Amino acid sequence: MKEKMNLTDKNLRLRPAKLPEDIKTALPWYQDAEVLYFSEGKGVSPYDYKIVERMYHFFVEKCEFYIIEVRTKNEWIPIGDAGLCRDCLPIVIGRKDERSKGIGKRVLRMLIEWARALDWEELQVSVYTYNERARRLYEGAGFDLIGTKRDKQRNEIWKFCLRL
């Protein structure tokens, strides 16, 4: 397996998450109602430090897990996180002022390219059916809708797959 490394696209970088340092940075993202609604489901309460810590440790163990950073004049600013897992591709733009700028699309493209470099055969992702923006993102990147399921709270979820 290839070593975890930075993935870059001009002024956008995915760098491997560093624990515990990045947990404190990410905490405000997971206290944002919009982030939680689209990534975790309806009615989810804001996360505290311990929940973010558990989630980050889980993703670091399971996936290639990155902090999304944008370059300003002289520094890289963390704005979200993303994971490259075989069965999920979580992408969270935590900073509200960085949403709706096409960053998620660029992040997804970088993750797909890295999965190909790792010789993966396919990627799968699940998205809440009320998250039309995510559906457009994944279908625009070539993912096919392969089914639906329900989560523990009975929210309907689309399942997508991309053959690499």
Image (tube, rainbow, N blue to C red):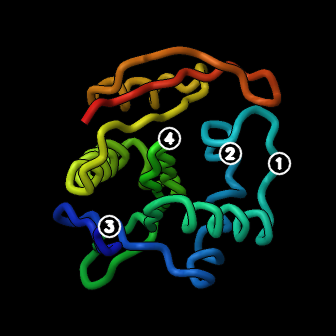
Q: Is residue 106 visible?
A: no
- Identify whether 84 is placed above or below 52: above
Looking at the image, is mark 4 or mark 1 earlier in the sequence? 1
Dot 3 crowding, Cα within 10 Å, few <14, some 14–19, many 20+: few
Residue at figure coordinates x 56%, y 77% from the top left: 22
Marks 4 and 1, how far apart at CA: 25 Å
Report the amino acid beneath label 2.
Leu
- The residue to which callout 2 is attached is 36
Q: How far apart are marks 4 and 3 (CA)?
A: 18 Å
Q: So how many labels did they put on this image?
A: 4
Residue 87's tag is 4
Q: Element under label 2?
A: helix
Which quarter of the rendering shows the C terminus?
A: top left
Q: Do the residues labelled 1 and 2 touch (CB within 8 Å)?
A: yes
From the image, tell me which residue sits under label 1. 45
Q: Residues within 10 Å of mark 2 (few under 14, many from 20)?
A: many
User: What residue sits 47% from the left and 63% below the top?
Assistant: 65
Q: In this view, does 45 lie to the left or right of 91?
A: right
